[in-house]
Image (spheres, helix red, strand yellow):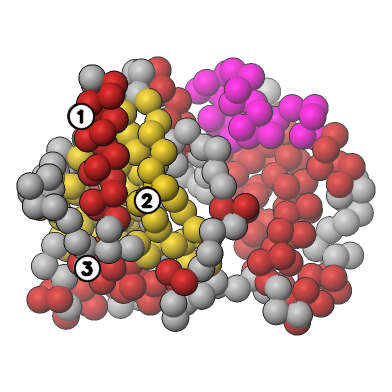
Amino acid sequence: MFFSVVIPTYNRLPILQKCLFALENQEFDHNIITDYEIIVVDDGSIDRTLSWIAEEKTSLPHVKILTQNHKGAGSARNLGVENAVGNWIIFIDSDLVVTPSFLQAHSQALIKAQEKENSDKIFTYGAVINTCNFDNPTSEPYKITDFSAAYFATGNVAIAKKWLLEAGLFDTMFNQYGWEDLELGVRLKKLGLKLIKCPEAVGYHWHPPFNLQQIPQLIEKEIERGKMGVLFYQKHPTYEVRMMIQMTWIHKLLWGILSLGGTLNENTMKPLLQWLINQGKPQLALEVARIFLNWYNVKGVYSAYNQNE
């Protein structure tokens, strides 16, 4: 196996540094993995990403850098795949820090699955553990909120390059936040690819601790996710997709009730959220904020759908 690890990035240099050094520190069986490359696709960053990678060239021997104007993660991943040498692609995000056995775990799971299924129509999905600990992200324990039921998500996934090309890569019409990876997953499922869980391939997804200043951006993301969700449904008008994007009466009723019809919002919940943050529980505060963030998402979905209709 030759792995090409494809990483889109945009103005994330501090955590990207940890991401790349972790990938350079891999321990694996050379009889299974012949070699690997790390393809960083810079999506128009205006920080020191490009100059830092150039300066650290000797410390990052596996890194290949590609650049494009700011077009979004889907377009960046496509560019990475098109230029990849490897026969197997691993997608991670630039804020993910992996363990030393990361590549080995994916390779073992892929080989075992191919032998069992007698087919290479498989892909492995590793564990993603969310953390706010920048200094030592890999010390974070697994939490119930880290569980994902997604079929195909680009946070930590390994798949044969040929199946990505046959499916048609990422749809660049998804030019705002959300759904481009799950939409590709629908096409991969139609090709008959099987998801293989690989919890041994662990990545720690870092994000800054939640604070109230993040709320406007989080709300905007939920509105964008609603718009892109409608695009997803237009491409695949199934009940399964409606459930995924929360465009059902169930979700409308659920989040309408939980938010008291929008009465529980960023303004009315501000004191509680700030109290939780002051208690050293920013992650719990974020989960509580999901009450109104999901309501914004549901409203965004229906607003975009009605406009298109």
Query: What is the CA distance from the residue labelled 3 to the residue labelled 1?
Result: 27 Å
Inspect this view and state whether residue 184 appears.
Answer: no
- Magenta: predominant secondary structure element? helix
Residue sitting at 68 percent across and 23 percent down?
A: 309
Residue underneath mark 2: 200
Q: Amino acid at mark 1?
A: Lys
Q: Amino acid at mark 3?
A: Asn
Q: Amino acid at mark 2?
A: Glu
Inspect this view and state whether residue 281 appears.
Answer: yes
- Above or below — where is 140 with respect to 170? below
Query: What is the CA distance from the residue labelled 2 to the residue labelled 3?
Result: 16 Å
SS of the residue under disc 3:
loop
Q: Earlier in the sequence, mark 1 or mark 2?
A: 1
Instruction: Tell me the tag on residue 141.
Output: none
Q: Position of residue 247 (x, y in %)?
A: 70, 30
* Residue 217, quarter of the rendered image: bottom right
Instruction: Tell me the tag on residue 25.
Output: 3
Q: Was residue 182 drawn as part of the magenta stretch in this picture? A: no
For the residue pair 245 and 43, the one nearer the viewer reads as 245
Residue underneath mark 1: 162
Q: Earlier in the sequence, mark 2 or mark 3?
A: 3
Residue sitting at 71 percent across and 73 percent down?
A: 281
SS of the residue under disc 2:
strand
Q: Residues within 10 Å of mark 3 (few under 14, many from 20)?
A: some
* Mark 3 vs mark 1: in front: 3
What range of the chain is rendered magenta? 229-252
- Above or below — where is 104 with respect to 164? below
Query: What is the CA distance from the residue labelled 1 to the residue labelled 2?
Result: 25 Å
For the residue pair 86 and 269, the one nearer the viewer reads as 86
Is the residue under label 2 in contact with that under label 1 (CB below 8 Å)?
no
Q: Position of residue 218 (x, y in %)?
A: 64, 59
For the residue pair 253 and 68, the one nearer the viewer reads as 253
